[in-house]
Image: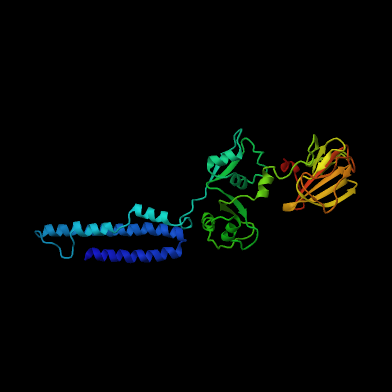
Amino acid sequence: MFIDGLKKTADVMIKKLRNVFYTLIPSSAGRLVFRSIAAFCIGATVCAAGASLAGGARTENGVGGLETPGVPKFSEDVLSVTDSSASDEDIASAAALLPESETAAKELTYFTYRVKSGDMIGVIADTFGVTQDTIISVNAIRQSRLLQVGQYLKIPSMPGILYTVKQNGETPETVAAKFEVSADKCALVNSLSKTAAMDSGVTIFVPDAELDWVTKQEINGDLFRRPLHGRYWLSSYYGWRKSPFTGSRTFHSGIDMAAPHGTSVYAALPGRVAAVGYNETYGNYVIISHHSGYRTLYGHMSAVTVVRGQNVDMNTRIGRVGNTGLSTGPHLHFTVFKGGKTVNPLGLLR
């Protein structure tokens, strides 16, 4: 029958299209495009059948009621073809049954938000349906408590963080494994295959990933505790300053915390005492090694109460405030090193 022929032709077309799209286009995208074209082919079959039937009806009328051989009746055959087609609801239902990794990932887009008075990162994140980690990562925020009114933030359309490839050959699949998130989603959002080798220095967006604990503590100012638990005042800050001894512009590698002579000094973070000694600049000093590449230096102390190799925590007294070395009065000089370079302690202390 004519309709059977159309159905067979449509079936052949659909099978060929399926093979082409599943081969040339990644799985989720190929399936979506294929379904659309398959539905179109089925619809075209129905239209062709309808057109042929209409032509048959005109022929019938033209020859005085004679039926055209091979043309089926509309009520029987066309309805059978229509019933075999896939509706929009069928296609949607089939897509819903596929695993998440087999459906197209949400497109990554960015919004711009201007910080208002009283804004907090957590509230902004909730408003846009992302996490604090997402806003911190995408905007390279180093101190979460120092948002500026009028500052512009980039807000992505989904939760996740930025990741910079550490070494050549990393793939979306290996990166996703580090963060225990979906490799398929990571690849799709970045328009890559799961096994695409990436160069060192390339930055990608990792959906649903979170910052590690240490980074969160650093940015929120909760990693270190102040080494002086009693009253003190900052007599000198980190950065460039006029030297109190030479009058020239010099870089101050830490902060000076002025306090009464003999005030107890505590470790700012758990660690192991790496060095104890005396020199002309810092007088009596202690250096402690911590996790994540951190080291802290405590200088100008009147006394040291720990020894090299000793494990300490934040309740361990390591010495007392003094005026030894190159000093203008009783205070503690406190320096933080990260990976061998000094950083501003005020951004880390709570």
Residue 89 in view here? yes
Against 19, residue 57 (above or below) is above
Q: Examine the rendering and report whether any part of residue 282 can be seen.
A: no
- Of the pair 271 and 45, the residue shown nearer to us: 271
Measured as percent of width and height from the top left, residue 259 is found at: 83, 36
Location of residue 179 with respect to 333 vertically, above or below = below
For this view, does 326 lie left or right of residue 163?
right
* Residue 249 horizontal side relative to residue 90, left or right: right
Horizontal and vertical percent position of residue 55: 19, 58
Q: Nearer the viewer, residue 294 or 266?
A: 266
Residue at (67, 44) in percent of width and height:
219
Task: Work out which residue is located at the far left of the displayed protein and give it.
Answer: 64
In the image, what residue occupies the spot 80% across and 50% down? 288
Which quadrant of the structure image shows residue 261?
top right
225 or 333, which lies in front? 225
Tally of marks: 0
Task: Give the image location of residue 71, x and y in percent.
Answer: 18, 62
In screen coordinates, is 326 left or right of 228? right
Q: Position of residue 19 (x, y in %)?
A: 40, 66
> Where, quadrant-wise, is the C terminus in this rendering?
top right
